[in-house]
């Protein structure tokens, strides 16, 4: 796997761990609220059950997402499903932040908590009908809601960040599948490997617009103007060479053939080449 794939998967794992931590904190606090309210037979608002269900579902989802990133990260179906669920949990945690908006203040004076509303200076909480769990003060309940409010906002941000990371994993997996085995990747699947200090080679832009385009053909303007043979021959300006009877570079006359009509046999009279008196080759 290329460095880009490892980086994307590592980033996705970090985001999933943070999402799991945020959901687990809210689940733990609202589980305490539910247990305490139920144990003392106090009324339980609907939003408390809703927040408990959302945080519990988010914990389960992030656990499965961590496993999927390690094993099936980048597969289009699972990544698209993860992007859809991430978007859904963004909206869900926005609701959680709205439901716990009572803790966005200083928790001093009059506050609204899951255990009721009142002044934190009085610390009066309805006791209900017995119960063995200890009821918190209004100030403590407000501070717990403040923690849930802050954590919910963090969860919204990190669920949003997971969407482009999942999209990047899909693109990276498709890119890896597009390259077959070659010496650049050690005859294994994946994109060509290069050292971190090596620059990426520039692409040839000649064929980028149309990969099927043919090379440009030569035109008449690309050719040199031709000259006559006599202007380009070696030894220009000398007497023209005669096909018959010229003197060679060796200094003797070549044989000539003349036509005499009515001659015997074939009608030709042949003159023979004179004997070379200098066989040593020095002339």
Image: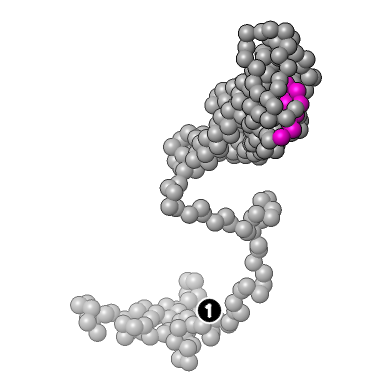
x and y percentages locating residue 184 in the rendered image:
46, 42
Residue at x 45%, y 83% (from the top left corner):
234
Near-viewer residue (168 or 229):
168
Work out whether residue 5 can be spotted: no
Q: Mark 1 points at which residue?
A: 262
Q: Which of the 4 image quadrants contains residue 29? A: top right
Q: Is residue 201 magenta?
A: no
Residue 83 placement, left or right of 258: right
Q: Which of the 4 image quadrants contains residue 224? A: bottom right
Establish if 283 lies above or below 107.
below
Q: Give the range drawn in magenta.
A: 109-117
x and y percentages locating residue 114 in the rendered image:
73, 23
Establish if 161 lies above or below 95.
below
Query: Could you classify mark 1 by the number of other residues whose Cα lies within 10 Å: few (under 14), some (14-19), or many (20 or more)?
Result: few
Residue 89 placement, left or right of 63: right
> What kind of element bears circle 1?
loop
Magenta segment's dominant SS is strand
Near-viewer residue (59 or 180):
59
Q: Which of the 4 image quadrants contains residue 253? A: bottom left
Residue that protrudes farthest toward the left in the picture: 280
x and y percentages locating residue 163 in the rendered image:
67, 36
Residue at x 78%, y 15% (from the top left corner):
43
Near-viewer residue (204 or 124):
124
**Tell me, what colour scheme is on the image?**
one colour
Residue that protrudes farthest toward the front in the picture: 122
Q: Is residue 115 magenta?
A: yes
Residue at x 51%, y 53% (from the top left corner):
200
Residue at x 78%, y 19% (from the top left corner):
45
Work out whether residue 135 can be spotted: yes
């Amino acid at each position: 796997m290329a460095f880009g794939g490892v980086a994307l998967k590592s980033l996705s794992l970090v985001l999933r761990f943070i999402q799991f931590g945020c959901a687990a904190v809210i689940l733990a606090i609202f589980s305490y609220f539910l247990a305490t309210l139920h144990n003392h037979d106090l009324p339980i608002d609907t939003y408390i059950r809703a927040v408990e269900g959302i945080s519990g579902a988010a914990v389960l989802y992030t656990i499965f997402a961590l496993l999927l990133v390690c094993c099936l990260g980048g597969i289009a179906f699972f990544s698209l499903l993860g992007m859809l669920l991430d978007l859904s949990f963004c909206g869900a945690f926005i609701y959680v932040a709205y439901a716990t908006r009572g803790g966005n203040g200083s928790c001093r004076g009059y506050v609204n908590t899951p255990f009721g509303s009142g002044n934190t200076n009085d610390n009066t909480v309805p006791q209900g009908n017995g119960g063995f769990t200890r009821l918190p003060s209004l100030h403590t309940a407000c501070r717990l809601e403040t923690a849930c409010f802050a954590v919910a906002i963090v969860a919204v941000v990190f669920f949003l960040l997971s969407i482009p990371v999942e999209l990047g994993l899909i693109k990276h997996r498709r890119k890896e599948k597009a390259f077959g085995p070659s010496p650049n990747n050690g005859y294994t699947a994946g994109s060509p490997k290069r050292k971190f200090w090596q620059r990426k080679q520039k692409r040839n832009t000649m064929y980028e617009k149309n990969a099927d385009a043919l090379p440009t053909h030569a035109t008449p303007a690309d050719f040199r103007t031709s000259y006559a043979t006599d202007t380009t021959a070696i030894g220009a300006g000398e007497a023209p060479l005669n096909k018959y009877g010229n003197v060679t570079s060796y200094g003797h006359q070549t044989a000539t053939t003349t036509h005499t009509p009515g001659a015997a046999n074939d009608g030709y009279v042949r003159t023979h080449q004179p004997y070379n008196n200098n066989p040593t080759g020095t002339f």
